[in-house]
Image (cartoon, rainbow, N blue to C red):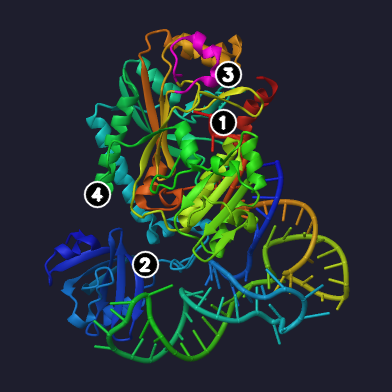
Amino acid sequence: MNRSYVGDLRSLPFNSPVRICGWVQYVRDFGRVVFVVVKDRTGIVQTYVSQDDTALLAEAKRLSPDDVICVDGILRERPEDMKKPDVENGDIEIEAKQINVLNRCSPLPYDVNGDPSDITRLKYRYIDIRHSGVLRNLQIRSRASMAIRNYLAAHGFVEVETPYLTKYTPGGARNFVVPVRQQPGKFYALAESPQIFKQILMISGLDKYFQFARCFRDEDLRADRQPEFTQVDLEASFIDEEYIYGLIEGLMKQLFMEVLGVEIVTPFPRLTYDEAMSLYGTDKPDLRFELPIIDFSENFKSSRFNAFKSVVESEGFVKGLYWSEPLDRGALKALEQASTGSGQKFLFISKAEESFLTNGPKSVLVEESWLQLGTYVLVAGDSERALQFLGELRLALAKHIGLIPEGRYAFVWVTERPMFEVGEDGNLQAAHHPFTMPNVTSPEEVLENPLKLRARAYDIVLNGVEVGGGSIRIHRPEIQEAVFRVLGLSDEEIEERFGFFLNALSLGAPPHGGIALGFDRLAMILAGADSLREVIAFPKTKSGLCPLTGAPSELFRNQKEELLPVFKAAMEGGE
RNA sequence: GGGCUCGUGGUGUAGAGGCCUAACACGCCGGCCUGUCAAGCCGGAGAUCGGGGGUUCGAAUCCCCUCGAGCCCGCCA
């Protein structure tokens, strides 16, 4: 007999023989009748053993959770008063005729119905996947990658794999490093992204490339960051920004329709970087709700509230949020608590008919004639940092007053980021990456006033999460060289690090550009999960540990012998 | 690299100087039970409180070091 998935039983006729294979979810033993709930990747179903078959009854009593079994039986409709509409498959059951135990399961190491710690879940990841939503999430992730592959293939993109073992490039993310036994002193770097290779593929004439690329970055981790992660990396030749926007908008439309059945409206709104910062205080605004930042500077020019008035008078600003409902004292307290340690000057005012709440001097503020009923969140300052702080308050306030709708997917393009920014050491850094085309066409203009330049770069933001970013690339060597100069690289450094690449640019490079989508984050949003770990089969902890395998581990003796010359030569040679 | 929080049976938590001979729930073992829905009821086993050092008459509890976990900042072109 062929086995059925539990999820397919409903399509079979009642009273027909069925076979299901899976894991024991629960055993409910009533002495002379036993219920065994069986689970496979599609769901759960109740099987039962009646008193008539004493041998089978004894067998069923010996089952424990997560025993691997195969049940042959008859698919039955449950008696009317035994139906449970709120339980999965609660109106059907299988009368077991034979139970084969394929493998006994030892007592489970943790309570799968409880709230295990992350490290416990990862140590027994197979149990975790079996019992949590991860099983479902992995299937969603798989459907997402299929949908993306189909879409890109239909649009003429060619999937090409690029090396993970590659050359170390200083600047940007720290690379993981791999010793090379055959060449003492030499190391590969694990690719932090396929950036150079995909540009080389454009120069090669491939025209349209994509890849699900694993990227490796040896940086300190966060809750939403893994040392290895997956990007949908793509690049195309003879295109401009509009091509990328259209391509990705179509991709998202198809992706959300195929995976979730959700209609995404295109085209996506666009904001320049400056607009995003001034309206929402962030370069990745959550547009599921409005609540824009408003300039209140004028209102404080003639105010008696001197702390803010003085800021406006010294060419600063007072900006803030306005919400038409007043907040209670508890809510204001919570906002204030979220603000301590920000180092910013802030003020909360909540005005209702009969009461007036504020964290500032009440008597002075009550006289402000422009105040309307509702809530004001105000920040005084003169820096981008003050705007960012307001952006954080915008999110906090929206969460507090329940302004963020469920099941809404708000995409937005953020464009025209500055090309360079001043780094901590006072030197200029590329805001996106140094292969990004600036909004000028000659090397002279690049060198003239680099801080004024805008990058032809774009980020795609979904619900306040940056899910992708890319740019039109530099395809002319003299402009690429000028950008390297601005970044403070000497002729020798340029030659040593990027000589091969400049050479390639001078040997027939077409205009090109592309984008990389953070596939883990996309999968997370599609699955409705609140952490990347819920959509990655085998994630690592924040210290880069894999509790399942115990990686990373020390070298074995034979490895030490083989690798000693590599490290010895490395410490003696190089820079 | 910096700041904050946490570590107690297999799992999740309570206990915050003596009431601890360490409590509770789930799980586990034994028993009862013919229709349950994470079944119920009765009984039982299981932790020297992450590790090391110190303070104290007395430490799970206070202090120092260390290991591990979590959150944040730096970092992630």
Q: Who's the residue at 67% across and 19% down the image? A: A575
Counting every numbered tag in the picture gives 4
Circle 1 SS class: strand
Q: Which of label 1 and label 3 is nearer to you?
A: 3
Whether residue A527 is in magenta: the answer is no
What chain letter is assigned to the residue under label 4? A
* Residue carrying label 2: A67
Q: CA distance from mark 1 to mark 3?
A: 25 Å
Residue A321: give x, y in percent of width and height.
Answer: 50, 48
Q: What whole-number distance in Å separates the C-alpha atoms at marks 3 and 2? A: 61 Å
Indicate the quadrant where residue A5 lies.
bottom left
Residue identifier under label 3: A487
Of callouts 2 and 4, the N-terminal one:
2
* For residue A229, above or below residue A235: below
Q: Earlier in the sequence, mark 3 or mark 2?
A: 2
Name the residue carrying label 4: A261
Label 3 lies in what chain? A
Say if labels 1 and 2 share a chain: yes
Q: Nearer the viewer, mark 4 or mark 1?
A: 4
Position of A274 with respect to A561 (left or right) is left
> How far apart are the alpha carbons under marks 4 and 1?
43 Å
